[in-house]
Image (cartoon, rainbow, N blue to C red):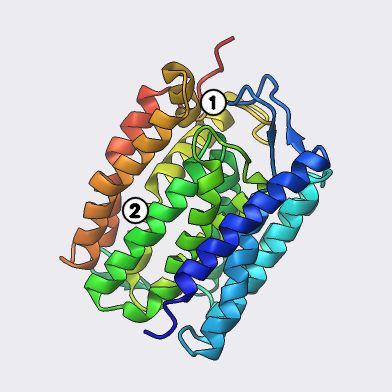
Amino acid sequence: MIYWWLIPVVAGISLVLTAALRRYAMARSIIDIPNARSSHSIPTPRGGGVAIVVAFLLALPVLGLAQLVPASALVAIGGAGILVAVIGFMDDHGHIAARWRLLGHFTAAAWSLFWLGGLPSVTVFGISLDLGWMGCILAAFYLVWMLNLYNFMDGIDGIASVEAISACLGACLLYWLGGFESLIWVPALLAMAVGGFLFWNFPPARIFMGDAGSGFLGVVLGVISIQAAWVSSQLLWAWLILLGVFIVDATFTLIRRLLRGDKVYEAHRSHAYQFASRKSGRHLPVTLGVLVINLVWLLPVALCVVVLGLDGLFGLIVAYIPLILLAIRYNAGDLEKA
């Protein structure tokens, strides 16, 4: 209990550092200028996600020294997160060819899986499946997709922050109710780091996260979910459910664009949340809508999986069906209207 002071400290560091980064970005003209592919209309400083990275990483050594989290997990999370954040920071300040970014992303995934021990056995409809080396390959692609989809979904004010905070705090609740209290520290501190940034990013945003922050969040959330899977297979399914809004929207959009033959590496505005924000004319209703879905629908389903023993894959299917319908309703992956 004596280490609970970390929670307000991490939030405070993130809050203050985001303010400093905003002043730095404005002084150096590190500004996101709206264009035809943007979901915003006002030039806004970017790169504030570095505050999340720094605040969270500063807390990891404390968790290690206090023996609250195994050193291997901290090295996996911290190493992968740093590499992805550095790549994103460099891309925010210039441009890195897609092939080099992808190489760096897979390197980060491999690093984390090495320290975690790969992907553990996964229970599917009561059957425990040990995928061996194939599981490691699938896990690597999962982590790379998570960090990229998080970047894709960070397109309107507050949405990426709200998703991370609600998923992390939801996971903390699941850990507590399921008897996995030792896992609470990492998602709790990540939620606090994002919370300090959200003060500045809440609609209307005064600073954007940037690739450094969004990629960092995506890979860290992915690594945390695999770390939890080593404790209980049900927790992996729970994380996939909690992150369902982002996973479904990004994946559904990607599949539709691939089938249409689009250049999927090019920027676009065809995610469901982007269509929804243009239809409403504001970002706030969509961001709050994501929060409501996470709390009212996805969290209860995840609770059924972890606490009541509902099969994880079945719970995932149940959780995702309404999300897929929403993606269809809001034309995810459709051609952008002029």
Q: Is residue 95 above or below residue 101?
A: above
- Judging depth in this view, the residue of 111 and 197 nearest the camera is 197
Residue 293: image tag: none
Tell me the amino acid under the disc marked 1: Ser
Counting from the top left corner in percent of width and height, residue 220 is at: 55, 63
| Residue 235, quarter of the rendered image | bottom left
Counting from the top left corner in percent of width and height, residue 102 is at: 72, 53
Q: Secondary structure at mark 2?
A: helix
Q: Secondary structure at mark 1?
A: loop
For residue 44, say whether it is visible. Answer: yes
Tell me the amino acid under the disc marked 2: Ile
- Give the residue displayed 50% in from the left and 30% down from the top: 271
Q: Is residue 243 above or below residue 79?
A: above
Give whichever of discs 1 and 2 has the lower sequence position: 2
Counting from the top left corner in percent of width and height, residue 77 is at: 58, 71
- Judging depth in this view, the residue of 159 and 25 nearest the camera is 25
Q: Residue furthest top?
A: 338
* Horizontal arrangement in the rendering, residue 17 relative to residue 242 (left or right): right
- Give the residue displayed 60% in from the left and 45% down from the top: 151
Quadrant position of the N terminus in the picture? bottom left
Q: Are marks 1 and 2 in contact (CB under 8 Å)?
A: no
Q: Residue furthest left?
A: 308
* Horizontal arrangement in the rendering, residue 233 relative to residue 307 (left or right): right
Q: Is residue 66 above or below residue 202?
A: below
Q: How many marks?
A: 2
Q: Is residue 38 above or below residue 180?
A: above
- Judging depth in this view, the residue of 267 and 299 nearest the camera is 299
Residue 241: image tag: 2
Report which residue position mark 1 lands on. Answer: 270
For residue 123, say whether it is visible. Answer: no
- Give the residue displayed 24% in from the left and 45% down from the top: 296
